Image (cartoon, rainbow, N blue to C red):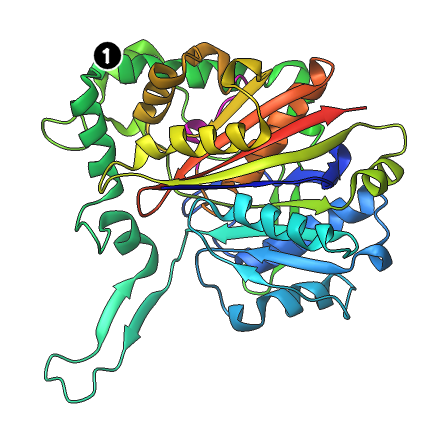
Amino acid sequence: MTSAAVYRDAAVPLRALWSSPFARWGGALSRISSLDAAVAVTDRALSERGVDRAAVEGLVLGWTVPQPAIFYGATTLAARLDMPGVFGPMLSQACATSVAALHQAAASVSTGAGPQLVVTADRTSNGPELSWPAAGSERGPARENWVRDSFSRDPVTGRSMLATAEAVAAECGFTRGELDALAVLRSEQYTAALADDRAFQRAWMVAVEAEDAEHGPVRLTADEGIRTVSFETAGELPTVRAGGTHTAAAQTHPADGTAGALVTTVQRARELAGRGPVVRLVASGHARVEPARMPKALVPAARAALDAAGLKSESMDAVHTHNPFAVNDLYFARETGVPPEAMNTTGSSLVFGHPQGPTGLRTITELAHVLRARGGGLGLFTGCAAGDTAAALVVEVTD
């Protein structure tokens, strides 16, 4: 099952795409809520980029892990950003949240609304323990660890996300060696993108500078928790599951972070960009595949977006994926013919981690800057999400 949308007039000034560094689980950003991190980073991004806050007419807040006072999340965020009259929806679609938020913003713009601020933020660290009173039950309240239980069991299939990756690897005959090689490749690509004192990342990465009332200042200027992978270290790791193929190097790690964008019409984006480039939103696609086969969903989602735009994968100048498991990219490459080394040329969520909501938007930001570095062109983002689903987005970077 697939669905798709085409955007006739929606764009983002390249400079109005940003992301914070991502922090490892339990790391530098675990002491503040994702809303606090979002306020700090978004406020700084808007100021540094000279965005007129009075011009912002709407807000889309994407999150997947509840935080304190999240019931008022969007309006609180707007007020703390000195935009007290701005409001809008909050969206939560697991790892597809970023594409869903951009789609919502583009839809609003297409109906005549002014610039829409998209903010995505999540903290997998310190995920909440939820309980629901069970009236009349002798067993007491039902309980759930929001993050861990969500990762470990899909209520529809009873299987974990890792189980979906292992199932696809087994069906396709992908070996432990192939998965290790993909993990090493993504690590090498990320490391290469740090050249010239992280010049590539500095173009879009916004440092986190916030205050924690109990523990003092919080500061994060670069990704935290990056695990460099070599063939030697990859080969020494045990598989996560007995008899499986994925190791800790071949799957992502939970993280904390935030990312943002300002979506408006193409003309307005050009005005806001000045002489800078514009990222046009071309089309998006969503897909759901057979139960417990999540890594496969990247392919039909990508095809849905490409077909809606009248394009082919071979016409893409750059391809980036959200790949929580190495098998995702191997399957995508096998089905589309896109070589693994031509994808994710600056790294991926397999390396820098996965805060869920903002992961896609950070990856789209990197994709846009990769396109800009080559002089513009068309790019594809696609990534899997919970429930054996995926979301994809085609963008075009132009002057």
Which x, y percent locates residue 280? Answer: 71, 33
Q: Give whichever of 87, 254 is nearer the camera.
A: 87
Q: Is residue 353 visible?
A: yes
Quadrant position of residue 232: top left
Label 1: which secondary element: helix
- Left or right: 292 as drawn, with respect to 9: left
Considering only vertical position in the picture, is 296 above or below 122? above
Identified by mark 1, the residue type is Gly
At a point 43% along the width and 44% down the height, the residue shown is: 95
Quadrant position of residue 290: top left
Q: Give whichever of 316, 325 is nearer the camera.
A: 316
Which x, y percent locates residue 370? Answer: 64, 20
At a point 32% along the width and 21% down the height, the residue shown is: 331
Considering only vertical position in the picture, is 189 above or below 209? above
Which x, y percent locates residue 249? Answer: 32, 25
At a point 26% along the width and 41% down the height, the residue shown is: 161
In the picture, the quarter occupied by the C terminus is top right
Residue at the spot of label 1: 177
Q: Give whichever of 329, 379 is nearer the camera.
A: 379
Q: Is residue 389 magenta?
A: no
Q: Give whichever of 338, 247 is nearer the camera.
A: 338
User: How many numbered discs sit on the rendered protein?
Assistant: 1
In the picture, the quarter occupied by the N terminus is top left
Q: Residue furthest bottom?
A: 136
Q: Is residue 351 magenta?
A: yes
- Please provide the residue range marked out in magenta: 345-353
